[in-house]
Image (cartoon, grey):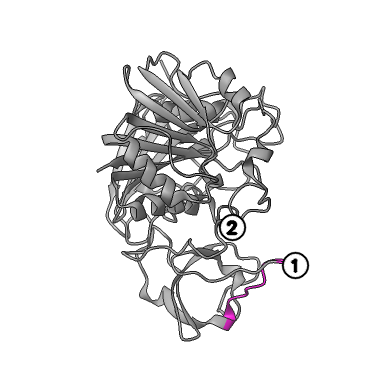
Amino acid sequence: MSNRINTDSIVDLMFHLTWKSEHASHTDCFLASNVNIWRDQLPQVLLDSIMNKQAGERIELHFKQGELLTDVDPQKIFKIQQSQFNRRSGKDSTTEPYPGRFYPKGILSGIVNVFKENIDPFRVVARSNGHLKVYFNHPLAGKALTLSAFVGKVTDKRVERGGSSTDWIETITPGPGMQARGGDRSSDYFSEVSFVRDDEAPDSKFYDKPRFTYHLDSTAIEMVRHTYGRFLNDGMQVLDLMSSWQSHIPAKLELERFSGLGMNEEELKRNQRLSDYVVHDLNADPSLPYESNGFDAVLCTVSIEYLIHPLTVFDEIARILKPDGYFVITFSNRWFPTKAIKIWKEIHEFERMGLVMEYFIRSNKFKASKTYSIRQLPRPREDKYYPELRFSDPVFAVWGQKL
């Protein structure tokens, strides 16, 4: 019989934190490994719910606003002078306070109990007349939250040696919430320099030679494949946007048509899953060479950060999708740095989902938007970055359904 959770257990828990914002629903998954039931900190209601559970069981808890995390504190919404925002972010770079965006608190001066080393995020709500309105509450403050936990490995600890105690709610909640707008106000990701890149030479030159490399570790690739599998069925017509030598779709899936649009012909030829392909540079020409209403789904894997005309591309995606078709975008925290747009490199990884959400919202051609993330899975031992990197590459996904 499998071990049941007791006060002497060491447990792996896969947490799923879900909530809703005005424009989307959101899910963040986080693997908490080696949770020490006796020593670590968990909400009492969660602790009571998992006691006596065994591997494979799942619990789900619903929290009203202010129950799992603190509620919105009006005193944490206040005005400061714009001069208190340190625009100098590096030797040759500056940071501007854009409404809707998040910044580390340490960038501010003259705020009680805020020091230069503080990386906790705050949000700029508004900017006017030499002042900034800032939001110091947690990004999920005021939200009704659902927290589920799937029980993984359960073992009995052999000895209690003391040591640090982990507050698991504090550990899993930094980041989630930053992908949503602040109320009904759009987040300003669209400055005049947001879509410039370090290397502005034609992309055709950069992609002239094939790169037969893996851009994610095998665990992250499997998570991407699982994500796409939620939307794809046999017999569909699907476009792999910004495709390469591999497409991360379920192995047994039999599509009627699987088209690839990418930058390097040698890579596309190597991709055995594609039924046809087109070499096309979306940054030189954001139009898509496909008929209207022709695809059931469009996929984009670890490439959205390279688009310099994303809103035009999103309009084109909506054109070629069938009604109710899905556009599904996945990405991680790895990219070609000289070709990624400036804004992508400046913002928090959860804000990147917010940027992609803005593409969907501003296109006004999609519904049923959702964000999804999964983090802290173990990195495969055979991966070249193991053991320097203990955890698998995080996977972030944003999708919308055509109106």
Q: Give whichever of discs 1 and 2 has the lower sequence position.
A: 1
Segment tinted magenta in the rendering: 83-92
- Secondary structure of the residue carrying numbered label 2: helix
Residue furthest to the bottom:
129
User: Could you tell me which residue is drawn at 45 percent across and 64 percent down?
Assistant: 188
Alpha carbon distance from label 1 to label 2: 15 Å
Instruction: Relative to 121, say whether 174 is above or below.
Output: above
Instruction: Relative to 89, say whether 273 is above or below.
Output: above
Quick one: label 2, few (<14), some, or many (20+) residues within 10 Å? few
Q: Which residue is identified by label 2?
A: 346
- Secondary structure of the residue carrying numbered label 1: loop
Quadrant of the image containing the N terminus? top left
* Left or right position of 395 against 58: right
In the picture, the disc for residue 9 is: none
In front of the other: 215 or 243: 243
Residue 367 visible to the viewer: yes
In front of the other: 311 or 222: 311
In front of the other: 298 or 42: 298
Q: Main secondary structure of the magenta part?
A: loop
In the picture, the disc for residue 91 is: 1
* Left or right position of 358 against 218: left
